[in-house]
Amino acid sequence: MEVVTALSDLRTRVGSARTSGDEVGLVPTMGYLHAGHVSLVRRARARCGFVVVSVFVNPLQFGAGEDLDAYPRDPEGDIAKLEAAGCDLLFQPSTEEMYPEGEPLTRVHVGLIGDDLCGRSRPVHFDGVALVVTKLLAACDPDAAFFGRKDAQQLALVRRLAADLSFRAEIVGCPTVRESDGLAMSSRNAYLSPEERRIAPRLFAALSTGAELVVAGEREPRVVVGKTLSVLAQEPRLDVEYVEVRDARTVQPLERLDGEVLLAVAARLGPARLIDNVVLHIDGTSVTVDAGEIN
Ligand code: AMP
């Protein structure tokens, strides 16, 4: 695996791979890699001849008072995991490399999708995500880019951004990878104390209870949200930010549950803000629950 820090080197290496006939796959990350990230890299490896992973803690997607400085980092561990997963090129730029003029004047704002759900409490977050993903897609111009369904709103936003801006990359959504007790893997789980770590799987337990209700025939969003909230409420240390049912592609509210439906939760637990979701594929009376996979 080669490691580069300059956008010009990223362009050159990807250009050579393409000239030799390889499809290029891109996996954007913020590092401190875990099995969820690794599953994205393996999917990229299975599909593409040349796999690029970016590790960049993008300051633009952190608001004032958020955890930019505390965000966990493990450059050596990341390199070992990426080598093992078959990554060809690690792109690890500095902030100066990505934003040479300082704070960018250019904004990429994916209105309806980015302003809602997590965007309500994190008003600058999705503009930051949209800008950095745009820069990475523009510099790398991959055939496919891989994103986790754990960040379902981000996935919807990236799909829309890529369509609006006519990037040729296929945006590939990948299953949420979970710990054995159901907790969705996240770099931010490192913030949890042992006691909080014991409580955290309740998010997935609540989502599973909501999903079971839909499998049993419930189609009223308010009822599913209410049931999910009631499971979360049993744990007073969870400070629930939202539980919502949305169209998974557009992230817009639904009057009745039908099609590809996102059941999503965000909650604070001690120093961590946790998000999780399941996607329900509803066709008449048939319901398939996409909850991801246990590592
Ligand atoms: P991050 O480093 O948190 O920005 O995540 C980088 C990519 O990995 C994003 O596309 C995430 O959705 C994805 N990802 C993070 N956690 C998981 C997980 N538990 N399962 C699958 N994908 C994940």
Image (cartoon, rainbow, N blue to C red):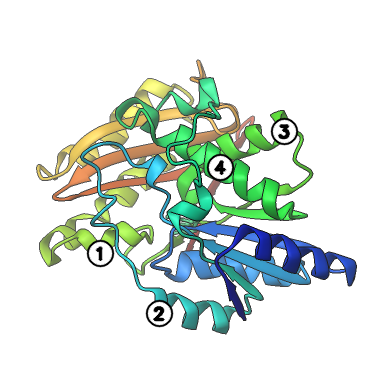
Q: Is residue 291 in sight in this rendering?
A: no
| Label 2 SS | helix
Circle 4 residue: 155
Counting residues from the start of the chain, the first of labels 1 and 3 encountered is 3
Circle 2 residue: 77
Relative image position of residue 82 (x, y in whole percent): 54, 77
Question: Is disc 3 surrounded by few (<14), some (14 to 19) or many (20+) residues within 10 Å?
Answer: some
Closer mark to the observer between disc 2 and disc 4: 2
| Mark 4 residue's CB less than 8 Å from ligand 1 | yes
Residues at circles 1 and 3 in contact by the CB criterion of under 8 Å: no
Residue 60, disc:
none
Question: Is disc 1 surrounded by few (<14), some (14 to 19) or many (20+) residues within 10 Å?
Answer: few
Residue 260 shown left or right of residue 274 in the figure? right
Give the CA distance from mark 1 to mark 3: 35 Å
Give the CA distance from mark 2 to mark 4: 26 Å
| Label 3 SS | helix
Give the CA distance from mark 1 to mark 2: 15 Å
Residue 190, disc:
1
Q: Residue at x 54, y 37 (%)?
A: 130
Residues at circles 4 and 1 in contact by the CB criterion of under 8 Å: no
Residue type, label 1: Ala
Give the CA distance from mark 3 to mark 2: 35 Å
Quadrant in which the N terminus appears: bottom right
Residue 182 shown left or right of residue 173 in the figure? left
